[in-house]
Image: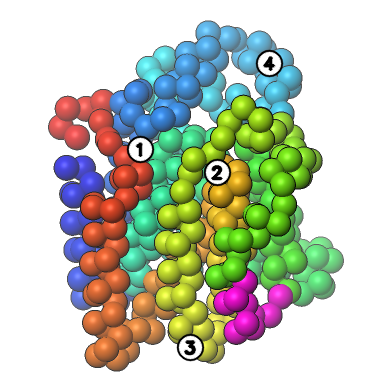
Amino acid sequence: MIYILFFLLLLIGYLSKKNSNNTILKLLCFCIWLIIGLRNFDCFPDTMGYVSDFDYFKKMSLDKIWDFSKTKTEPLYVILSWLPSIISDNYQVFLLFWSLFPSIGLYFFCKQNLETPKDYAVAFLIVFVLGYFAFVASGIRQAAALSLVMISYRYLMKITTSRDFLIANNFAFIKFLALITIAFTIHNSTLVFLAVFFIRLLPFYSWYILIAIGAVSIGNLFHLEQFTIVSAMLLGDRFDHYGTSIVSELSLSGYFVQLFLFLLCYVKRADLIYNSKENVFFLNMMLVGLIFQAMTGVIGEMFRIAFYFNMFAMILVPRALAEYRKSRLGRFIVYLFILSCFIYLFFLSSSNLPAYESSISLL
């Protein structure tokens, strides 16, 4: 029921006649905050584990939590998880606190890069289609890290030349690095996002589509142990056990969904690039996300890394659909796409809309 109400709000936003109004964006982000923050402690796979962390942290004094955090590779997660206990020892306050991160991150990410209620509505539809909602609703730490990465992009946009790194009064680079550093101390997978400095320099060529289609077979060129070694080098011991005791059964359905979204944008690449050179970067980021997503056939948890790159589909897909809407046939394609998304979410996907139970009976 809660999902139906949310998607009705999406449809209202999409059908809105106002061309520039971020009220719908604020409502959508507010609803996301409530939905994620007011979930029951046993709702979604990882919630109970995080609530257990909070129950452990809240018993400590400030001095003890500070000393304890220094023994962890992600100290800020420990400190921030302890902070809600100052207000209340109720786990709901803890969940509401952490749910602020994805809701605020999505707000700034969309507000900075999109313009109309239609764009905002499509962006949040993509949030669900990508599986981003299901992921951030469960994984508190990486949800916070991804949210800070989203906010950091507004500063990354201002770094357009090598000279920008040297200008004394240009703090964009410093702010970007500060946010990435903070995100790293919450979830150290954030390190992979630094690849943006290389991706921003890449042009986009039509033959890249071959990489997107063939990426699913890349994992077969390597042995699982090689992925384990590389992931351990980049991310510590976070994934080192996936090559031994845990065998990933995650399907590649997420890959094909992302490939479809990429192709949707690829068809309109000329218009997108003409409108903004920034869209070249978005296309390349989606491509890199596809490559990481393709690795789920070897290590299922690679989808976590893919989110740092495929999240830009939330921006590029609405921009591409805006180009489709300029013709009668294009408008038909847009409506068919939206209908397909709803069919996928409610009838074909078993994970993108996980069973929801609120701590409040009305929800």
User: Gap between marks 2 and 1, in whole Å?
Assistant: 24 Å
Which residue is at a point 28% across and 53% down the rendered structure image?
348
Residue 141 screen position, x and y as percent: 55, 35
Query: What's the residue type where badge 2 is placed?
Result: Gly
Identify the residue position indicated by label 2 in the image.
300
Examine the structure image and report whether residue 206 is included in the region drawn in magenta: yes
CA–CA distance in space, label 4 to label 2 = 31 Å
Badge 2 crowding class, 10 Å Cα cut-off, few under 14, some 14 to 19, many 20 or more, is some
Stretch in magenta: 202-211
Nearest to the eye among marks 3 and 1: give it. 3
Q: Earlier in the sequence, mark 2 or mark 3?
A: 3
Residue 67: image quadrant is: top right
Residue that badge 4 annotates: 68
Residue 93 in the image: above or below residue 21? above
- Image height of 69 relative to 227, above or below: above
In this rendering, the label closer to the viewer, 4 or 2 = 2
Q: Which residue is mark 1?
A: 36
**Residue 185 among those drawn in magenta:** no
Q: Earlier in the sequence, mark 3 or mark 1?
A: 1
Q: Which is closer to the viewer, label 3 or label 4?
A: 3
Q: Amino acid at mark 4?
A: Phe
> How far from the left and from the top, in percent, is residue 59?
53, 8
Q: Image quadrant for the N terminus?
A: top left
Q: CA distance from mark 1 to mark 4?
A: 28 Å
Neighbour class for label 4 at 10 Å: few (<14), some, many (≥20)? some
